Amino acid sequence: MNPSNAPAVSIQGRDCWLPILQLATEEVFELMLAYSLQVPAELPSEQNLDITAMVGLAGQLCGILSLRCSTKSAGHMASRMLGIDAEKAGPEMWDAVGEICNMVAGNFKNKINGLGDGCMLSVPTVITGTEYSLHAAVNDEMHTVLLFEGDPVVISLEVHN
Amino acid sequence: MDNICALIVDDSSVMRKIVERSLRQAGLSIAQVLEAGNGVEALAAVQKNKIDLILCDINMPVMDGLEFVKQLATMEIAKGIPVVMITTEGSEGHVVQALSAGARGYIRKPFTPDQVKEHVLPVLEGKR
């Protein structure tokens, strides 16, 4: 699988963004982790998703793209990226999840006409734990749940403008 | 080119390791890999070492990749060192900016080892 570069969706066509977000996520996992994410037959529980990676978007699209997963999944992602033992992944797992989120954000925006040059990405931030609240003036929100080694990975895009 | 010294510039240590692994999988003969977490660290590494190839991210704290390439171009000691950008910022505008600043190649994340090979080998062989 190669990332498909031809932007087919416009910045105005937000109704079509969700499948693009899903495709961008699948491509990153396929290319960087050699793993094909699955679409769950039914929505899994989002409990125990105690790692949240976030990348800010600014410019023609303002918002936050986030990736949530469990510590176990994060360890396995780091393991696949670095060839290390998943149980021994320490700070690498936060770095790995942050980079995956960063690549999903970049891959997503490069698929939307007009966002490639018109939208900047922040460096990723990673939060551990579940007891937090995020407050932002959200105008639009979309999220997709995919399965990584049987456990959920939630990708969300909050649009602020 | 055999036994090259490569400098990998990325604020993510995970990405630095992945880029190094991709270089080795591409079949390059690598004697040494140096790492830097931002443009300032990379400029210091260039001044202290004989480097044959630089692979550089764009979005980094302290000094980003585009500014690093611009400053590198002004350093006599860095003349002729090829720089290949590896970044999520894959738009045409970013590619033009990077190439105008002095980069010789551009790889979009996510990438495969084959893509690294495809972009790095011609640069090392002086074909770009």
Image (spheres, rainbow, N blue to C red):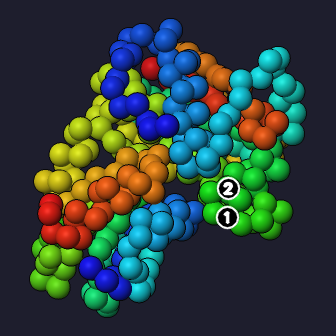
Amino acid type of the residue tagged 1 in the rendering: Gly
Say which residue appears at 87% left-offset and 27% top-offset.
A45
Q: What residue did someone put label 1 on?
A: A83
The residue nearer to you, when weighing B4 against B74, is B4
> Residue at the spot x=71%, y=59% of the render?
A79
Q: Which label is found at residue A80?
A: 2
Judging depth in this view, the residue of A25 and A95 nearest the camera is A25
Q: Residues within 10 Å of mark 1 (few under 14, many from 20)?
A: few
The amino acid at mark 2 is Arg
Horizontal side, residue B88 vs residue A113: left or right: right
Do we see residue A57 in this rendering? no
Q: Is residue A13 above or below residue A33?
A: above
- Residue B107, percent across and down? 34, 51
User: What residue is at 30 percent from the left and 63 percent from the top?
Assistant: B120
| Chain where mark 2 sits | A
- Chain ID for label 1? A
Q: Position of residue B8 (x, y in %)?
A: 40, 70
The quadrant of the rendering that contains the C terminus of chain A is top left
Left or right side of B95 for A55: right
Answer with the quarter of the image where residue B84 lies: bottom left
Q: Residue A127: tell me if it is visible.
A: yes
Local crowd at mark 2 within 10 Å, few (<14), some, or many (≥20)? Answer: some
C-alpha separation, residue under disc 1 versus residue under disc 2: 5 Å
Q: Which mark is residue B107?
A: none
**Label 2 near label 1: C-beta < 8 Å?**
yes
Coordinates of residue B125 in the picture (x, y in percent): 20, 70
